[in-house]
């Protein structure tokens, strides 16, 4: 989980001003979307690996690419706070090349992805640690029609996995020659959690030092409004 229930992002004081209030709250909302996408990704991979589900590729890739999208949005919104150079947010600047690949898919799909015999929405691979069967193996999920002659596979380690689903990696064509074509989504979530923990600590100290009053915005955030027409005689 990237957003803890006691995070100061959930209890922002009015004293910080409107601009920062809205930006920090947008980070909170983005983290909630990240946590939802990640929990659903892992749940669907577990169901697929256990044989409870089949052919749910569209769900899984939806959550995987959603993580890329929200992760890059978190990075850009954080930068709107005008942090100093080389701040902790740069820990996740590697997300950009993957967000760029899917954002400009229409421009790159023929000259790069199809020409290189890659699945248009990429592939996902993860390591299953099945303690009941005492098995550790890698699963590979392909989006779309499978070109078996172009499959590349690197053997995983045989130990050190503490969860059922581990090392979820999304592979695509990021276009840049110096860019990696594979992103570890589990590590990405860990990195965003690390950034968020540092931000939480900084905000807690700032609010405490300035004696700002923390507020519970529960009744005034993420509201639902039902608009009805007046009765006509």
Image: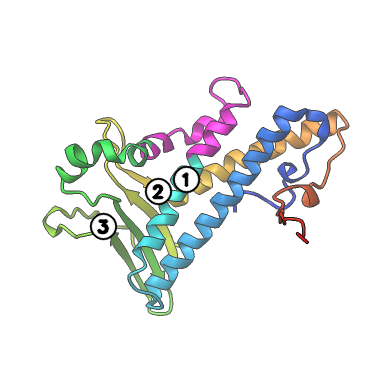
Query: Height in image: 39 above or below 2?
Result: below
Query: Height in image: 64 above or below 71?
Result: below
Marks 2 and 3, how far apart in space? 15 Å
Q: Identify the residue position indicated by label 1 in the image.
A: 188
**Left or right: 142 as drawn, with respect to 134:** left
Which residue corresponds to the image point at 74% horizontal and 42% vertical from the top-left?
8
> Hey, which quadrant is residue 112 in on the image?
top left
Q: Identify the residue position indicated by label 2 in the image.
A: 184
User: Foreground: 221 or 174?
Assistant: 221
Q: Quadrant of the C terminus?
A: bottom right
Q: Position of residue 53 (x, y in %)?
A: 39, 75
**Left or right: 73 as drawn, with respect to 179:** right
Q: Quadrant of the N terminus?
A: bottom right
User: Foreground: 67 or 134?
Assistant: 67
| Of pointers 2 and 3, the one earlier in the residue sequence | 3
Which residue corresponds to the image point at 53% horizontal and 34% vertical from the top-left?
75
Query: Height in image: 166 above or below 23?
Result: below
Main secondary-structure element of the magenta-colored stretch: helix
Residue 4 in sight: yes
- The answer to whether mark 1 and mark 2 are in CB contact below 8 A is yes
Marks 3 and 1, how far apart in space? 21 Å
Q: Residue 95 in magenta?
A: yes
Q: Nearer the viewer, mark 3 or mark 1?
A: 1
Q: Position of residue 227 (x, y in %)?
A: 71, 54
Q: Identify the residue position indicated by label 3 in the image.
A: 155
Q: Secondary structure at mark 3?
A: loop
Which residue corresponds to the image point at 14% horizontal and 42% vertical from the top-left?
115
Q: Secondary structure at mark 1?
A: helix
Q: Residue 213 in magenta?
A: no
Which residue corresponds to the image point at 40% horizontal and 60% vertical from the top-left?
60
């Amino acid at each position: 989980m990237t957003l803890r229930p006691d995070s100061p992002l959930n209890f922002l004081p009015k004293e910080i001003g409107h601009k920062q209030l809205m930006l920090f709250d947008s980070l909170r909302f983005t983290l909630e979307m990240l946590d939802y996408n990640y929990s659903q990704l892992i749940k669907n991979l577990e169901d697929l690996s256990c044989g409870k589900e089949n052919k749910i590729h569209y769900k899984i890739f939806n959550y995987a690419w959603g993580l890329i999208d929200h992760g890059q949005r978190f990075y850009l919104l954080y930068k709107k706070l005008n942090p100093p150079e080389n701040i902790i947010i740069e820990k996740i600047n590697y997300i950009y090349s993957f967000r760029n690949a899917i954002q400009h898919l229409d421009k790159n799909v023929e000259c790069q992805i199809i020409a290189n015999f890659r699945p248009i929405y990429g592939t996902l691979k993860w390591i299953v640690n099945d303690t009941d069967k005492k098995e550790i193996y890698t699963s590979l999920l392909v989006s779309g029609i499978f070109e078996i002659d172009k499959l590349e596979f690197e053997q995983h380690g045989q130990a050190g996995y503490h969860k059922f689903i581990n090392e979820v990696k999304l592979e695509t064509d990021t276009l840049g020659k110096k860019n990696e074509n594979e992103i570890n989504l589990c590590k990405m979530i860990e990195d965003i959690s690390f950034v968020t923990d540092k931000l939480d600590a900084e905000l807690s100290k700032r609010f405490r030092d300035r004696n700002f009053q923390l507020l519970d915005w529960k009744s005034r955030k993420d509201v639902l409004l039902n608009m009805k027409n007046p009765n006509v005689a």
